[in-house]
Amino acid sequence: MSDSATATAHKVTLIAGDGVGPEVASATKDILAAAGANIHWDEAVAGKEAFEGGIASGVPQDTIDSIDANRVALKGPLETPVGFGGKSANVTLRKLFEMYGNIRPCKELPNIGGPFAGRGIDLIVVRENVEDVYAGIEHMQSPGVAQCLKLISRKGCEKISRLSFELARSLGRKRVTCATKANIMKKTEGLLKSTFEDVAKEFPEFTSDHIIIDNACHQLVIRPETFDIIVSTNMNGDIVSDLTSGLVGGLGLAPSMNLGDQAVMFEAVHGSAPDIAGQDKVNPTALLLSSVMMLRHFGEFETADKIEHALYVTLEEGKALTGDIAQGRPAVGTKRFAEEIIANLGKRSDKLVDRDYTPINMPKVSSDLDFVKCSDRRDVGADVFIESGKMPDEVGKSLEQIAEGSNLQLKMISNRGTQVYPVAAAAFDGVDHHRCRFVMRDKSQAMTEADLLDLLQRVGQSWRWIHIERLPEYNGEPGYTKAQGED
């Protein structure tokens, strides 16, 4: 009898999910039970059933309570409304429990064909999981212009950077690469780059470097075997982790872990595939490998290794493979594939290099909301965003007159990030969304609340202003960027 069989059962919230979710969940449960994993499953609901029941978040309170109690969840695919309706249930679960780190292994599996087969790909994408545009803060600025706020914090960057190095340490990895778009988004993406470089100094045993995210994608399809761990912001990490799964056979083989201080959720990252749901066709490998990660989280290394080796042996033998990986050979169904893995429990594959797994040392950072303290700050002006179908020249001349007699003066107007007043762009086909930058006439003086309110009252009498952004300086450094063409 295995050690895990005699130990107290691990309580896990099981969200089978939508579409093919119940099938991959059933196969995974069968394999874990056969391997001797002692799991008590607390079955819960999220996704389609919850949306149809009128729960806008897609996550019922009972499910939240279950995860809160168990602290560990295993989740199949969930359906999410596209372009309308409620929030993504997947994102809701991650954010409710502050699961800030999404860990996506990308490892070549045996006997899976494709252009990258034989390259020895074995990398991990670490994706920040709760910030960025996934904050979901969107507004229609005008009837034809939408805005999404990209929120990146120093705290979030430090947590995900530290987690990437602690993961490298726990797995015996050697290199951590930070991938951002800091060359364009210098304040947001640049914050991850600078934070990562600061944190890297505390982990001198690792090689650390930075790469622009588009170059990272380029390099991943040229020499993917050179990467070890890649850490990135939420949106970029989402995209690049799907790319990497495609290098080794697709999302049907891709496991993941959502990690936080209060809870951890292991999930298959593929979709619900409603076109094949209930037909015994789906490949359960993604959720099975996610459960292997879960077992290692519990410290059940022996059982995890047993299942992973059995999967590898099954793939190597190629006698019973699901249709997505059969590649011209006779395909079997989900249940038959699971039975073959169960039959191979106890066998070992020489294709699988065992690692000396150790627990991840979760980063410890300050819980202060004002994570970054500032000793000196002042506002030097404000950007006032105006909705108008008038041309920039007309808007600009009007605002200059409106601001006469105030402590603020119009510096420039930009449209979608390019200065269009006082110097017009060479080609202009703009929209009714003007960023109007006002600065203090006396540059030695800071803008006061009275200055800003006076300006808004003046502007509001003639123009519809949408929102404002202060132009701060923190410790003498500007906390804003310039428009294209702005001096």
Image (cartoon, rainbow, N blue to C red):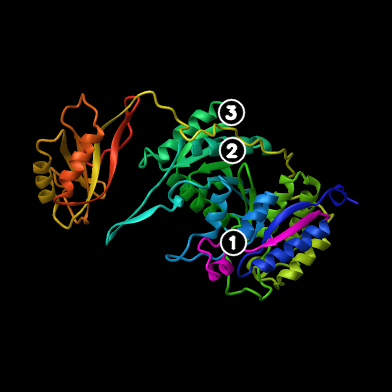
Q: Residue 203 carries which label?
A: 3
On screen, residue 177 versus residue 72, left or right, reads left
Give the residue pinned by disc 1. Answer: 60
Secondary structure at numbered mark 2: helix
| Image label count | 3
Q: Are marks 2 and 3 in contact (CB under 8 Å)?
A: no
Indicate yes or no whether the magenta region holds residue 212. no
Q: Residue at x 59, y 38 (%)?
A: 163
Q: Which mark is residue 190?
A: none
* Image: magenta residue range: 36-60
Point out the tag, 1 or 3, that comes first from the N-terminus.
Answer: 1
Secondary structure at numbered mark 1: loop
Q: Which amino acid does label 1 sit on?
A: Pro
Q: Residue at x 60, y 33 (%)?
A: 364
**How far is the residue under mark 2 from the one under mark 3?**
11 Å
In the image, is residue 449 above or below residue 107? above
Q: Which amino acid does label 2 sit on?
A: Leu
Point out the tag, 2 or 1, that comes first from the N-terminus.
Answer: 1
In which quadrant will I find the C terminus?
A: top left
Give the residue pinned by disc 2. Answer: 163
Q: What residue type is labelled 3?
A: Phe
Graded by Cα atoms within 10 Å as few (under 14), some (14 to 19) or many (20 or more), the crowding at tag 3 reads: some
Residue 156 lies, in percent from the top left, at: 50, 39
In the image, is residue 455 above or below residue 29? above
Q: Are marks 1 and 3 in contact (CB under 8 Å)?
A: no
On screen, residue 472 versus residue 135, left or right, reads left
In the image, is residue 22 above or below residue 213? below
On screen, residue 371 versus residue 395, left or right, reads right
